[in-house]
């Protein structure tokens, strides 16, 4: 389903879109801090080697199985611009039994609730929101943040559900994507089981994963991202993986990935020169730590879908060619640290540099 652009929205919808995008930016910053910066500093303080991400691990079609990192903070967070209709409960498992409220949260061990829980903790605009969010991140499956439907005249966003399962079958997700890209017209198996198997493998490639080396959490996230193409409002799915040591986001902006990397000083010097930065400013705004001839920084990679991963312009059916890539790198940037709010991202070319 095509999402409406800002130019197609009414005034109230534009306000809601602005609030959603602003809150999403803040959520992204906090999740990046929780999943990347905090574990990094914990390793630094305890003299434990940090599991840096290598260039090859951020390239499309990565096939290797990876060992889980003990310091990573795995999670899935779904953030919706509007309220999910109950009709979607068949595949996105949210109900009264897993709603964020006092009597359901008391079942979770080691969770500290605020005394004024109903009026504070779960609303995005409250100071207590991220404290509650961080405590619930360790609960398996997904967290759901959406517009609170009880406040129709206000654009209030709320952490409404936890332990949200994604139950849409992989075959249905692959069929949906294959129809969208015009590789089939009716059903996944209309051209035989082998063709259907390849389409399911390409579904994972489209979302930056490999069908054999992808664990349950990342599989659920990409299936959720494909499923939410069927709703008229914006959605964003964040997944942090202990295998990849990265955060991946799926939204109307496409697929993006965040990771802590080691940047050699020689290349860092070139980046500073191109952006007219002193080494002191570079350290202040971007460097998490350093050792030897390397700086530790957060890399942001945005991916794009080339011709064979996009719907054809003429809308006609086409033949699947498995060797043709459905995902490619669009841009890379070194991101400022969370507290460096006056610094801007720096463009780099690192993933294919070595």
Image (cartoon, rainbow, N blue to C red):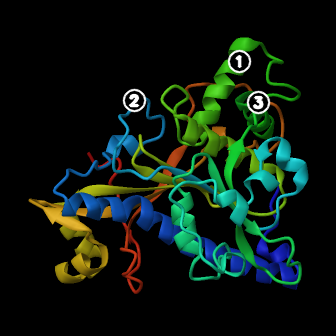
Q: Residues within 10 Å of mark 3 (few under 14, many from 20)?
A: many
**Quadrant of residue 258 within the rendered picture:** bottom left
**Quadrant of residue 32 within the rendered picture:** bottom left
Q: Earlier in the sequence, mark 3 or mark 2?
A: 2
Mark 2 near mark 1, Cβ–Cβ under 8 Å?
Answer: no
Q: Secondary structure at mark 1?
A: helix
**Quadrant of residue 27 within the rendered picture:** bottom right
Name the residue nearer the viewer: 47 or 54.
47
**Cα gap from disc 3 to disc 2, whole angstroms:** 27 Å
Is label 2 or label 1 in front? 2
- Specify the label residue 167 is tagged with: none
What residue do we see at 55% from left, 26% from top? 323
What residue do we see at 73% from left, 13% from top? 193
- Specify the label residue 195 is tagged with: 1
**Cα gap from disc 2 to disc 1, whole angstroms:** 24 Å
Question: Is 50 on the left-hand or right-hand side of 199?
Answer: left
Residue 348 visible in rendering: no
Q: Residues within 10 Å of mark 1 (few under 14, many from 20)?
A: some
Asked if residue 108 is positioned above or below residue 191 in the image, the reply reads: below
Q: Earlier in the sequence, mark 2 or mark 1?
A: 2
Residue under label 3: 183
In the image, residue 38 lies at what x, y percent? 35, 64
What residue do we see at 78% from left, 69% from top? 5
In the image, residue 156 lies at what x, y percent? 76, 79
Residue under label 2: 64
Asked if residue 157 is positioned above or below residue 197 in the image, the reply reads: below
């Amino acid at each position: 389903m095509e999402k409406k652009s800002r130019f197609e929205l009414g005034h109230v919808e534009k306000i809601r879109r602005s609030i959603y995008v602003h809150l999403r930016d803040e959520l992204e910053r906090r999740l990046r801090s929780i999943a990347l910066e905090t574990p990094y500093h914990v390793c630094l303080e305890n003299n434990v080697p940090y599991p840096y991400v290598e260039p090859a691990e951020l390239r499309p079609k990565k096939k290797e199985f990876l060992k889980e990192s003990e310091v990573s903070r795995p999670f899935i967070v779904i953030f919706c611009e509007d309220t999910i209709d109950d009709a979607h409960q068949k595949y996105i498992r949210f109900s009264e039994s897993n709603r964020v409220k006092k009597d359901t949260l008391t079942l979770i061990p080691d969770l500290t609730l605020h005394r004024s829980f109903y009026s504070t903790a779960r609303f995005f605009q409250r100071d207590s929101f991220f404290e509650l969010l961080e405590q619930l991140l360790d609960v398996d499956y997904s967290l759901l943040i959406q517009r609170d439907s009880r406040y129709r005249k206000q654009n209030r966003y709320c952490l409404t559900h936890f332990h949200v399962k994604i139950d849409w079958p992989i075959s249905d997700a692959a069929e949906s994507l294959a129809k969208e890209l015009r590789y089939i017209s009716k059903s996944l198996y209309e051209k035989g089981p082998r063709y259907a198997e390849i389409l399911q493998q390409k579904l994972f490639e489209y979302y930056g994963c490999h069908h054999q080396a992808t664990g349950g959490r990342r599989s659920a996230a990409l299936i959720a991202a494909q499923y939410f193409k069927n709703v008229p409002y914006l959605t964003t799915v964040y997944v942090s993986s202990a295998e990849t040591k990265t955060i991946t986001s799926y939204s109307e902006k496409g697929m993006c990935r965040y990771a802590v990397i080691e940047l050699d000083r020689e290349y860092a010097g070139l980046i500073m020169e191109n952006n007219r930065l002193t080494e002191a400013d570079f350290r202040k705004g971007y460097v998490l730590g350093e050792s030897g001839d390397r700086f530790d920084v957060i890399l942001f990679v945005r991916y794009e879908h080339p011709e064979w991963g996009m719907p054809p312009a003429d809308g006609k059916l086409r033949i699947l060619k498995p060797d043709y890539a459905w995902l490619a790198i669009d841009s890379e940037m070194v991101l400022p640290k969370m507290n460096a709010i006056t610094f801007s991202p720096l463009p780099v070319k690192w993933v294919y540099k070595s």
